Image (cartoon, rainbow, N blue to C red):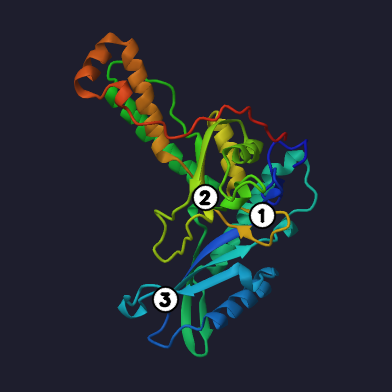
Amino acid sequence: MSSKQSVLLPTETLNLESGLSLVPRLKLNLSVHRADASVKPLDEWQLKTSLIDFLKSSFSISVPEDDLILGKLKDLKKRKREDPVARGTLFVRELGFLVDKVEPEEVEVVEKKVCEWKKKVVGKLDGIELSLVGVRFKLSVEVPKSDDFEVMRKEWEEVEEEVSAFDAGRHRGYARGRKREPDTIVLRGVPSRWFAETRVSSKPSMLVTHTIFSALGKIRNLDVAEDDGSDKDADEDIVRGLQCKIVVRFEDHREFSKALKVLCGRSLEKQGSRLKADYEVSWDKDGIFRNARSQNEENSRSTPKVAAYNDRSEPARHQSHAPYFSENHIRSKRFKA
């Protein structure tokens, strides 16, 4: 990222420590439904070929076969007529053609252009019918929420309103506390060995992880653990120990927001490896309420009237939830924009 720019363009790559880099791409979730009364099995190879040809003719983009993943759903005999017969994911990784040279003041213009192009692709793909050897199928397409920063921002603004109502309900007659805003990112689906100490262990290291993510902003604390695949779709295969789940709490909401925007719409790559980690990024919703509760309990200790109420109906402070994150007092090293 140029030192003249305050933000990373959606078509730019961000180089991190340990040979890692965040590479831009468009990710689309696909659902395939039958569009006629035929019961003939779906030919996945024919469907992939048709989609790849359509993308090339309609958008002049070439998608390698490996970047179009399609799979038939299990228990097709038990499904309802309106249920999909297959699901998949499409990745468009070459986005540089959308932007040539950009001046610092044109960053917002570029972001708008890329956003409009993505909407155009989705709009043209969603709902199209494909005829494969006389059998018709209909395609449903959407951008996953974890790849849409604006959708997530709207979501946390709605949660902020809920937290404000929560605060007002607990403290009627008292001034509201500071605004509760998210500050924590959750990343899933990244290779554990990429965050491990080289030639020491295959398990992710707190030190290595902190060093890598400090390029995105000032970190308050973080936690890294094995991703066991909980809360994932039952059709997804998760091999224990190969992937990790990373939770990063930033110094404040501003740092969090900038980091989340960079992580949205990108994949993680490592120098010398052909693997692309198409991770899932989200934000910690429970953390807002947890922080609000903690602050309310802290306020109650300094306000006699409220403290007396809490003594009767709320658990003591030492009985509250255990810390969600492991502490890390390493001085963060920021990526200089």
Name the amino acid, label 1.
Glu
Residue 269 image label: 1
Please provide percent x and percent y for residue 217: 62, 34
Which type of secondary structure does the marked residue at label 1 adopt?
Answer: strand
List the single residue furthest toward the left: 312
Looking at the rendering, which quadrant does residue 315 occupy? Answer: top left
Name the front one of labels 1 and 3. 1
Farthest residue to the right: give it: 101
* Residue at 56% over, 48% down: 203
Q: Which is in the foreground here, disc 1 or disc 2?
A: 2
Residue 170, image x, y percentages: 28, 24
For residue 138, above or below residue 308: below
**139 lies left or right of 12:** left
Q: Distance between the residues labelled 1 and 3?
A: 32 Å
Residue shown at the point (56%, 52%) measured from the top left = 190
For label 2, the residue is: 244
Mark earlier in primary sequence (3, 2): 3
Q: Do the residues labelled 1 and 2 touch (CB within 8 Å)?
A: no
| Residue 85's disc number | 3
Q: Is mark 2 on a helix, strand or loop?
A: strand
Q: Distance between the residues labelled 1 and 2?
A: 15 Å
- Residue 239 visible in the current orientation: yes
Q: Where is residue 36 in the image (x, y as percent from the top left)?
A: 41, 84
Q: Quadrant of the C terminus?
A: top right
| 16 or 302, nearer to the observer | 16
Of the numbered discs 1 and 3, the one sitting upstream in the chain is 3
144 in relation to 58, above or below: above
Disc 3 to disc 2: CB gap under 8 Å: no
Quote the CA–CA distance across marks 3 and 2: 31 Å
Q: Does residue 175 appear anywhere in the picture?
A: no
